[in-house]
Amino acid sequence: MDWAQSLRIAAPEELLSVAGIILLVASAWGQTRRDARAVTWLSVLTLAVAAIMTAPALWSGVSGADALAFSGLFSGDAFAAFAKLLIYAAAGASLLVAPAFFEKQNAYRPEYPVLVLFAVLGMSMMVSATNLLTLYVGLELNSLAAYVLAAFHKPDQRSAEAGLKYFVLGALASGILLFGMSLTYGFTGTINFAGIATALAGGAISKGALFGLTFVLAGLAFKISAVPFHMWTPDVYEGAPTPVTTLFASAPKVAALALTMRVTLEAFGPQAAAWQQIVVFAALASIVIGALGAIGQGNIKRLLAYSSINNVGFVLIGLAAGTPQGASAMLFYLTVYVAMTIGGFVAVLMLKDAEGNQIESIADMAGLSRTRPLLAAGLAVIMFSLAGIPPMLGFWGKFMVFQAAVQAGMITLAALGIAASVIGAFYYLKVVKVMYFDEPAGKATGRSDMLHEWLLATCTLFISPLGYLITKCLTALTVVAAGVLFPGA
């Protein structure tokens, strides 16, 4: 093993580890508001440096043996680099919006950004995993930090409840995943993704290996909140502090979906017929149940939780195609989804009453276009994009995954996905209707933090028609990243 190459490939993770430990020690010595903000900005700086260190692997399209580290346990290829850049961007945005929220309740402490750094470290390991052992270590490192983050706001009973629910159900999902991994090892004789693919390449899959595949996908389905393992999402999203929900809905989703792509396309790639049926069911069920579940919601955070379930379904359509075009479409959709999600939750953070208290009820947003016109406009653009209404960039993301499904011969899946997306448009447009056509409730009148306004403006411009200016560049990068998973294509 070439230690120099391994350390160079894993340099971003090493930076996150060292920075996390140093900032954790520093947090023990400083607990003031100023100290917490300083640790936050240092954490954001760490993520920015890690992104700079990661980007060259994507630009150069590194793949294969040149990207492997630590005897094949870890890969720093272009696919991992693309996912990491999305994770770093989402985590950085989640950190930036946190101080203004927690300081209102005098509950912000420097441990928060440190926990986010360790969660990001786990996510980075997840997307770089080429081995079931690395997969599990990264996933648990992310999960352990996430459980604490969900319950971080001690004065709020809902936060403690969210943390407990997430912990209990997350432990169950981890057990299911471990059982699937043990079955996979038992029937293939290896925990390396390439070795598993080689063992499964010879004819029909055995029943034991099929059970292993099913349990592994079930465990991962919990992490991406795909139906039928979605039950935790609305309660945790509503109960967790909004900056934490912003993180949960974006960065871990990217990590879990990227990991799912690696496992299915690399490890179980030779048995695509076995896992495609599972993915098709999860995709359609997530689209329909996510849309139907959101219709009756009166809380904007719960609505966005069901929206995330719905969007995971659309992303999985690209995976079901099992082609380079489908993988590329997934990465494109994920990029747009991260921007829409960050923008949506930043807009929720900006919904405050005159005393600065958070507003989460959709009814309290009535007439927002007359009291906060710019906020209403930004939120309307996000809703239109989430609904997939042209010319917003969300439409192009959905078009790409449907196109990939059609090219793969899955015309029925694409048709059902398009039909089900109409259901989702209803509840997105309902929010716009409440903001623009209902009589003003006069509640969302509080001032917003300037940093929140800039983040909302950035996300809104990206998913607006102006975003089409960079679609060629973004598509080219997704093609490079997705090509890593199809070395023979």
Image (cartoon, rainbow, N blue to C red):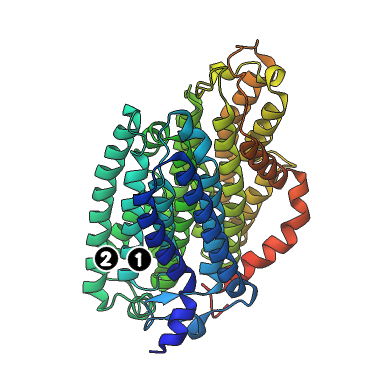
Residue 334 picture location, percent across and down: 56, 53
- Front label number (2 vs 1): 1
Spatial separation of the CA atoms under disc 2 and disc 1: 10 Å
Q: Is residue 330 left or right of residue 129?
A: right
User: Which of the pair 452/65 is nearer the observer?
Assistant: 452
- Decide: marks 2, 1 in contact (CB < 8 A)? yes
Secondary element at image label 1: helix
Residue 335 visible, this angle = yes
User: Which of the pair 410/307 is nearer the observer?
Assistant: 307
Q: Quadrant of residue 351?
A: top right
- How many labels, in total? 2
Picture quarter with the N terminus: bottom left
Q: Amino acid at mark 2?
A: Met
Secondary element at image label 2: helix
Residue 447 picture location, percent across and down: 62, 25
- Which disc, if any, is residue 275? none
Q: What residue lies at 58% left-to-right and 77% top-to-bottom?
A: 489
Q: Earlier in the sequence, mark 2 or mark 1?
A: 1
Residue at label 1?
135
Residue 229 visible, this angle = no
